[in-house]
Image (tube, rainbow, N blue to C red):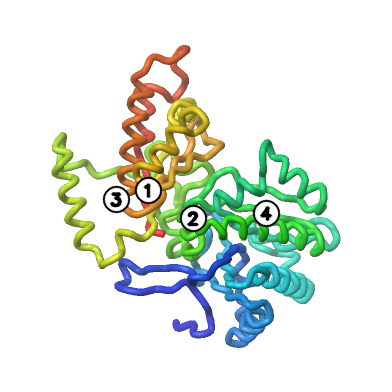
Amino acid sequence: MKRGHEDVGHAAGPATWRKREGPKMKYCLKVLIPDVFASYLLRDKGSLKDELQQESESRLVFSNKGDFFPDTQLRVLGVYSDVSDGVTRALDLILGRMREHCAEDESVRRQPPPGCEMVGKEEGELILRLVLSREMTGLLIGSQGANIKELRRDSGCKINIRDDAVAAHRLTTLSGSPEQLQMALQKLAENMKTEAETESDEFQHYQRVINFGEEGAGWGYGKGGPGPGQHGHGGSGKGGGYPQSNFGPNVSGGLGVLGEDLDSMPPGTAELPYSISCALPAQLVPALIGRSGDFIRSIEERTGAKVDIAREGVEGYRKMECIGPLVCIYAAHSLMMHRLQEVENSPGPGPPQKGAGKDSKKQWSSVFTNK
């Protein structure tokens, strides 16, 4: 069905290689909203959305209907502006409309789908979810958590950051009164502007990504990423087998096929941001990262890809994600696997831990996703 009034992520080219990006504007912050609230904002053929855009000098871009942020039933709403306070003004207006919508529709308060609550347990409490870039998350947390503790104290807002990242996006949940939320959003917007001024590749990647896959396909892992032997396709979280390689020890043969495939892709497609991820034995991660993250930084500088390892793990494994153009992420992933083999073959300081040795080879199962 054609949705002419919806401002969704752009699509171009054949259906197999659709390019989905947000608009090229200087500032951007993303909110996660239930589908019912998205429909509310897009009602009357988008007239309310147009009103909000005009009043805030911003642009609101919704993910496709049925396209949710991984592990949620929430659509992405990207707020873009070239005006320094445009994003903040738009978020204030959206917050006001959320309050209005919750007051008008009793079902929103009584029977929301799990994880889609917009009203808290306390009187007048609202719940707002955002996704932040890695840099914005770091600025929010601060050294040893100093910044987030201060913001919680000064604003009175409850702030929770999910441990794992998806394509360098961290889900952050705010809850409090509208006034408390506004104070917290003001600080988040300041952090966003600080990163935007750097014009970093990571922030440009953050700006581009609106759709995370048709109905979440390809992001089916939960907290900590795909487990050993698991694919992330289809949202099932069930294990899946991998086809056997036809190349055997002839690595160059596989590289030749990869080169041919990249050359056959539509122009510019291979340079779009992609992601490949895997589950690593948690006890080996410190050695993989290197002192103060030196080894990770060297891989990023050498390949041009971003390498992100989740802070928390699941069942003894932590998710590693490489993000960037295809050639870059394959190179980064290969170098990290080489480093992993070196660490595994090095004598440890103590007896082997659960999951190490032969069983740790299971970590090479990975999930590959086009942004």
Query: In whole angstroms, how far apart are the C-alphas of marks 2 and 3?
Result: 20 Å
* Element type where label 1 sits in the image: loop
Give the labeled residue for mark 2.
200
The mark that comes first in sequence, 1 or 4, is 4
Three-letter amino acid code at disc 4? Answer: Thr
Q: Name the residue located 39 percent from the left edge and 14 percent from the top edge.
A: 347
Query: Does residue 370 appear left or right of residue 164 in this picture?
Result: left
Point out residue 238 in the picture as x, y percentages from the top left corner. 42, 46
Q: Nearer the viewer, mark 4 or mark 3?
A: 3
Characterize the local packing of mark 2: few (<14), some (14-19) or many (20 or more) Cα atoms within 10 angstroms: few
Query: In whole angstroms, how far apart are the C-alphas of marks 3 and 1?
Result: 9 Å
The mark that comes first in sequence, 3 or 1, is 1
Give the labeled residue for mark 1.
304
Please report contact status of discs 4 and 3: CB closer than 8 Å, yes or no: no
Characterize the local packing of mark 3: few (<14), some (14-19) or many (20 or more) Cα atoms within 10 angstroms: some
Three-letter amino acid code at disc 1? Answer: Gly
* Element type where label 4 sits in the image: strand
Q: Name the residue located 80 percent from the left edge and 59 percent from the top edge.
A: 180
The mark that comes first in sequence, 2 or 3, is 2
Query: Does residue 269 appear left or right of residue 55 in this picture?
Result: left
Q: Is residue 258 above or below residue 62?
A: above
Residue 107 in sight from this viewpoint = no
Give the labeled residue for mark 4.
173
Residue 220 in sight from this viewpoint = yes
Point out residue 250 in the picture as x, y percentages from the top left corner. 14, 37
